[in-house]
Image (cartoon, grey):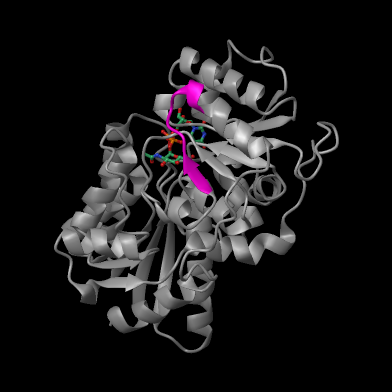
Amino acid sequence: MKHVDLIAGARPNFMKIAPIIDALKAAEQRGGALRYRLIHTGQHYDKTMSGSFFEQLDIPEPDINLEVGSGSQAEQTAAIMVRYEKVLLERRSDLCLVVGDVTSTMACSIAARKCGVPVAHVEGGIRSGDWTMPEEINRVVTDSITNWFFTTSEIANDNLRRAGVTDDRIFFVGNTMIDTLLKQMPRLRAPKFWGALGLHEGQYFVVTLHRPANVDGEQQLSRLLRSIAEGTQGLPVVFPVHPRTAKSLHELEGQIPGIHYVDPQGYLEFNYLVKHAKGVVTDSGGITEETTVMGVPCLTLRDSTERPETVSVGTNELIGTDPAKLGPVLARLMAGQWKKGGIPERWDGRAAERIVAELERLVV
Ligand code: UD1
């Protein structure tokens, strides 16, 4: 028997880990030797940011919850490392599998490598080049100590090669976030407020904002929301508010007509909203992948992206963080002039299957 630790810590991890668990279970039923232990770091902890994803995506209860909770970047990193190291010292595993680019990803990979446990990184190799993002630091640090990389694109493969990683450690498997999306597509369902807000297919926008450059400071957030309200010409705008954004919103709430603030949504409700929206305005990375697969126009309020294929192949456009830039782009979208987009290579719903097939070969 070989034991793999699966690490999940924050909201964008949960949909990436779910199909890997399914594939590991299927391999076990076929008589495979891999067993897993699901470790939740507790970086995200409340029902809306964590619990509802476990329920909706049928993710089993974590075997271990490190319960680190909120804190500064250093506090969270340190607490996760200390607690995960203890877990490994009590019962070592044969592999630590991390996903994405959140603080939990970096902290657990460091703790594992220092305990002599090899690390596999799902979504390895992506780079924004923007060193003001904590996620970029998490990516580079994690990849610098990763043994095996499971990648989502040829661009990621090239980034890794440029950093000196040899091809025998890179596995271009596709995108586990898209595995989950394709599996859940038939189950997507309208949120309860659909009727109350008067939403109709293709007749509203979805907004998500949580990056410090856009939300830490009322001025910037207020300007962005005003530009969005103007540019969407009276169509309803649904804004599921991330907890960090809520702190900057208190002064603004209710003051911008057309913008509807709602709680963070469950996976099935959020992606239903995206699928039927006229467009999405966001500063998330993961959402640009989902809009690409669903063929929904996406405006990204950032200057760079670690997922360039969502722009070159998909429906995403990088707008930057200047509110003045939004007007003309939204006008183009409202006039029906948006690229159609295609689906990036190997985003076909089978990434987790490929990952587990490789793990069965690598972890022996
Ligand atoms: C984290 C990830 C980011 C990801 C985002 C998605 C890092 C560096 N960043 O950023 O990549 O896109 O999650 O959500 O890991 N909070 C709650 N309830 C929760 C969790 C958090 O109220 O369940 C509050 C925290 O107390 C904090 C704020 O939300 O005030 C931010 O949470 P934090 O985990 O620090 O980072 P995010 O900004 O969510």
Report if residue 178 lies within the magenta region.
Answer: no
Count of number-bearing discs = 0
Is 79 drawn above or below residue 148 in the view shown? above
Position of 217 with respect to 166 (left or right) is right
Residue 321 falls in which quadrant of the image? Answer: top left
Task: Tell me residue 96's x, y (percent).
Answer: 31, 63
Task: Tell me residue 95's x, y (percent).
Answer: 30, 68
Is 183 drawn above or below residue 102 in the view shown? below
Part of the protein shown in magenta: 316-325
Q: Nearer the viewer, residue 50 or 273?
A: 273
Task: Tell me residue 17's x, y (percent).
Answer: 48, 61
Position of 153 with respect to 350 (left or right) is left
Residue at the (60%, 13%) spot, across then down = 252
Which quarter of the rendered picture does the N terminus lie within? bottom left
Position of 297 with respect to 247 (left or right) is right
Observer able to see residue 126: yes
Task: Tell me residue 347's x, y (percent).
Answer: 50, 67
Q: Nearer the viewer, residue 74 or 231?
A: 231
Q: Nearer the viewer, residue 202 or 187?
A: 202
Is 281 drawn above or below residue 311 in the view shown? above
Residue at the (35%, 73%) spot, across then down = 3
Q: Quadrant of ligand 1?
A: top left
Observer able to see residue 111: no
Residue at the (27%, 65%) spot, across then down = 92
Q: Nearer the viewer, residue 58 or 325?
A: 325
Residue farthest bottom in this picture: 31
Residue farthest left in this picture: 164
Which quarter of the rendered picture does the C terminus lie within? bottom left
